[in-house]
Image: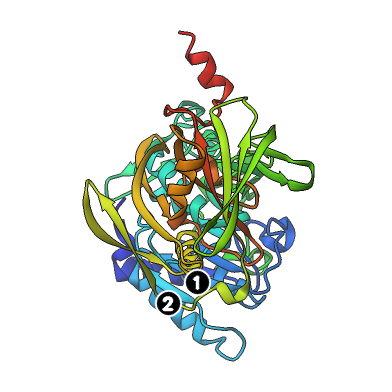
Amino acid sequence: MSSQHWDEKAFCESYCSTWEISHDQVHYGWLAPGENQLRLIDIDLANANVLDIGCGMGENLIALARQGANCHGIDISGYMLERARQNMSRYSDEIDHIHFKQQDMRQTDFFPGVSFDLILSAYSMEYLNSTQELKDLLYNLFKRLKPGGVLIFCFSHQLQHFRHNMLANASSKTGDDDFSTLIYSFRDVVTTLSEVGYLIERVVEQGTRNPSRLSYEDALGFPYHFHRDKNPCHPQFDSESNKTPHTIIYKARKLDTHGLEQDHQLNFHYDQQQVKIWGQNRSITRSTPFMAANKELIAHQLAPKDAVVGLCEVLAITVAESDLMESGDTVLTIDLDGSQSQLMVNNNCVQALVHRKLLDAELTPSYERSVFSAADEIESGLYIKRIDPIYGEMDRIFPRRRPGILVFINGEEPAHGTIGLEDISVTPGDHIQVIYIATSWGKQWRPKKKGEQQMDLF
């Protein structure tokens, strides 16, 4: 991805002098209905964290901030952000500060420690270089969304391109090298959203009839319209615009399961001596109390069924507002191939909160890096290798078994363990459990999906 003409002052000024965009409602397609009519945003905006990818002159963020949202925006163009800050200053008595940052959308380290209720993007993702970059971006945005959070984005409709018959099932670059965009096929976008873990809720196509004939007064009915006497639409475009939509909007949601539908992976029922893990009811055959750091814990042995033979709840936290910290990082010491190294993680990520709570309980965690497959790539994430002195006690109670540590959020392991806990922000009300498990020896102790089981046959 390059900034193309967006890093040129003259180009940005030409764009700003052509298009007049409302500060009263969220816009999507040009010369097309906005949020007041489409009603795509169904979350409570009061104090909601909102991110706009490619925020331009900040119009959508201003409209949302005026409804009480905490707004953040990134854009690759410093000139557009300069205009955005000027626009924001007009509402200094009405809205709180909007956080702007000049940054490439592919670099998702913006606004660390903030998880978002809503992420928007209007016509920005089409400036990526490939569908793989789109998948990587959607995956990284997925990690920044809160459970139940919404992603809404739009870009040019494939039917508007003269090669639309060739784009039916394959995305392709269009335009020249100086100003090219990526036209996405339906198949590529829907497949990517589904593979990452989003639930697709709505797809909206937007079109405009005879756009060159629209007067300024008529155009005012749309939040994204041209300045008076600045209609950029050519009459030759009208016939094509009358036949096909020019913009497509996707609305997707991050499931409450932190991304993958998992059906209440972990439920304890102590009074019934039952535990449900990964959707399987397990009987407890023996409970062994033990002391660790002046705290009594209980290790449960499970009736034989799969590789999990025992477990112990080390820590249970219901996140409170007081657990959130204003800023800063937590320093973790990790083992990298036998040598000690320090890693900084944001204070408000799950990993940092768990670390603080373990130390408060006089328990000592140690960390390593795990490697897993995600988004068609090999990624690494931080994990808790052991917790002392519990490690020794679990080894005594379950000899010759493999110990492991799982962290569940609201009864579920985030995205089957493929998202690092340093990438998940804590949210007040979340219930976090740190579970020591004992398994029979072997790598594959998580239950396999049916597809993986079938592949083993060949």
CB within 8 Å, label 2 to label 1: yes
Name which quarter of the figure residue 65 lies in.
bottom right
Looking at the picture, how far across and down is residue 131, in whole percent? Answer: 41, 38
Q: Real-space Cα distance between discs 2 and 1? A: 8 Å
Rate crowding at label 2 as few (under 14), some (14 to 19) or many (20 or more) other CA atoms within 10 Å.
some
In the image, residue 436 sits, relative to residue 43, either above or below, namely above
Q: Is residue 29 visible?
A: no
Label drawn at residue 58: 1
Q: Residue at x 69, y 55 (%)?
A: 40
First in sequence: mark 2 vs mark 1: 1
Q: Is residue 184 above or below residue 321?
A: above
Q: Secondary structure at mark 2?
A: helix
Query: Residue 83's mark?
Result: 2
- Number of marks in picture: 2
Residue 37 image position (x, y, % from top left):
74, 59
Task: Identify residue type, mark 1.
Answer: Gly
